[in-house]
């Protein structure tokens, strides 16, 4: 694809390696809307920038070269963080994946960087021999090999693009804070939409199926049962989604346990208590049937929230594969057993009517 | 804010201190300050902060560091077991490069 046809390219900058597409650090409404959609999972997997070299504002041959991934959200975050600075942005082909994940897979890697430095003619564009990589690109790039392969010295910049102006102003020096990956509330907050979307994608259909099952196999007529048991199922599942996909990211540091499955189950237990109280209020009389239905959700909601919480490991910034495997060895059997037990209790609640 | 700590004593990170040349590259790339410079050679400070990203291993010029790298992502582990291949981030084996760098079993 011709990089000049992309909507965010505003012109071109002439260099010895030809005309380089020019972008600005101010995002347009299309960029911002695209970013919001990506956060909600809409078109997220093909939100791309054409790989290659870009001119940010009006760089010259002495301007710094910043390397990034071709996920558009990443590219936009980088250019908007740089304000009025002039720089070259070298976009690697990471297939629309962010820097850290792509580095883990090796697509943001030594080979791709070396090849891209060659194919863009960077040595003719820049008079210096230095590229600045995001620190989180390090799992994929061997800096000492880049130097051998291309003659360019690979320097690791800060983790966050927002720290780049300070890094550059300090003569390419990062302080300790720039090198530490934290996970503050704001960063956890922006992940909630995508967590919600991926949880609802399978729990809403599950809710509808439970509504149908309640209607078909319940003790009374179809609509009476679908409304009585089925509708509450959907409410309860939404409670589990809220616990696992909203409360867990928000309250991550304060939820008990180190394992995410435990944190999720804890958030789910609170949601289950709220649901139990709700059942106590809306169901007349404390019949065996209501007791069983309450027990069912007291078991099912923590199990589901535990599963959703466990899946948040991939969005977090500090979990290891060894740790996730260790957690899953007991958590998955626990979730399956409690899930099955909960469903069995839910069925049994009708028999006790 | 205090830093998050995941499960204890699970990280597979190890160091051959004899090989270390004290270049400090691992201190630069580590996002969780696992490494400490001690008498011109590094040592592992806080193993429980290690998330096995592998940044230090690949950037060590003398191969003094070993770690079984991978993404700490439950969805990726599940996808690696399921019959259909995971796509994008949530897979242990990358469909793009054959997942050579990413441990999977």
Image: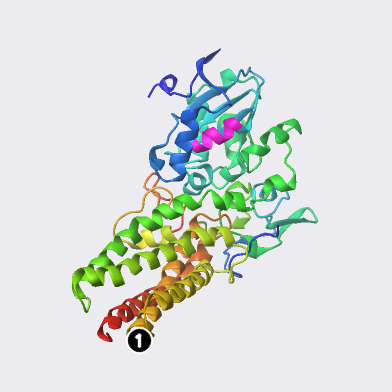
Task: Relative to B82, say whether A346 is above or below.
Answer: below
Q: Is residue A49 left or right of residue B57?
A: left
Q: Which residue: 58% across, 30% down?
A: A79
Chain of the residue under the numbered disc 1 shown in the image: A
**Is residue A107 in view from this perspective?**
yes
Q: Which residue: 61% across, 70% down?
A: B8
Q: Is residue B103 left or right of residue B66?
A: left
Q: Which residue: 35% across, 83% down?
A: A292
The residues colored magenta run A73-80
Q: Is residue B3 left or right of residue B74?
A: right
Screen quadrant of the C terminus of chain B: bottom left
Q: Is residue A78 magenta?
A: yes
What percent of the width, then of the height, locates residue A54? 53, 24
Q: Is residue A286 magenta?
A: no
The residue singled out by tag 1 in the image is A287
Main secondary structure of the magenta stretch? helix
Q: Which residue: 42% across, 50% down?
A: B99
Q: Is residue A113 left or right of residue A348?
A: right
Corner quadrant of residue A167: top right
- Residue situated in front as seen by the camera: A81 or B49: A81
Are there few (<14), some (14-19), or many (20+) residues within 10 Å of tag 1? few
What percent of the width, then of the height, locates residue A135? 62, 43
Q: For the residue labelled by badge 1, is the local secondary structure a helix, a strand or a loop?
A: loop
């Amino acid at each position: 694809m011709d990089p000049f046809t992309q909507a965010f390219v505003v012109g071109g900058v002439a260099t010895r390696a030809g005309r380089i597409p020019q972008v600005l650090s101010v995002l347009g409404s299309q960029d911002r809307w695209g970013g919001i959609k990506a956060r909600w999972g809409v078109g997220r997997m093909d939100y791309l920038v054409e790989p290659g070299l870009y001119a940010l504002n009006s760089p010259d041959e002495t301007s710094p070269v910043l390397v990034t991934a071709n996920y558009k959200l990443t590219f936009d975050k980088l250019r908007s963080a740089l304000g009025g600075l002039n720089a070259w942005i070298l976009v690697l082909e990471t297939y629309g994946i962010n820097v850290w994940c792509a580095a883990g897979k090796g697509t943001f890697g030594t080979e791709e960087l070396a090849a891209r430095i060659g194919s863009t003619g960077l040595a003719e564009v820049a008079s210096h021999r230095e590229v600045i990589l995001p620190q989180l690109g390090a799992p994929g790039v061997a800096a000492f090999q880049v130097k051998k392969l291309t003659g360019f010295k690979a320097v690791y910049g800060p983790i966050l693009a927002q720290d780049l102006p300070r890094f550059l102003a300090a003569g390419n020096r990062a302080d300790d804070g720039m090198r530490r990956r934290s996970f503050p509330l704001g960063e956890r907050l922006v992940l909630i939409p995508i967590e919600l979307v991926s949880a609802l994608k399978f729990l809403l259909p599950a809710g509808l199926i439970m509504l149908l099952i309640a209607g078909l196999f319940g003790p009374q007529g179809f609509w009476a049962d679908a409304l009585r048991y089925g509708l509450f199922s959907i409410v309860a599942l939404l409670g589990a989604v809220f616990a696992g996909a909203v409360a867990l990211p928000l309250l991550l540091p304060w939820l008990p346990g180190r394992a995410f499955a435990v944190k999720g189950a804890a958030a789910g237990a609170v949601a289950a208590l709220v649901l139990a109280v709700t059942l106590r209020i809306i169901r007349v009389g404390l019949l065996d049937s209501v007791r069983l239905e309450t027990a069912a959700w007291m078991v099912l909601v923590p199990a589901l929230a535990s599963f959703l919480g466990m899946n948040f490991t991939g969005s977090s910034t500090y979990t290891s594969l060894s740790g996730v495997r260790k957690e899953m060895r007991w958590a998955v059997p626990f979730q399956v057993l409690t899930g099955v037990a909960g469903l069995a209790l839910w069925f049994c609640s009708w028999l006790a009517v | 804010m205090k830093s998050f700590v995941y499960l204890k004593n699970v990280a597979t990170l190890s160091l051959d201190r004899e090989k270390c040349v004290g270049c400090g590259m691992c201190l630069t790339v580590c996002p969780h300050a696992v490494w400490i410079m001690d008498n011109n050679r590094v040592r592992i400070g806080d193993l429980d902060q290690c998330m096995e990203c592998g940044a230090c291993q690949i950037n060590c010029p003398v191969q003094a560091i070993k770690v079984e790298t991978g993404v700490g992502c439950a969805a990726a582990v599940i996808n690696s077991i399921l019959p259909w291949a995971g796509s994008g981030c949530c897979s242990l084996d990358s469909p793009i490069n054959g997942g050579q760098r990413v441990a999977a079993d």
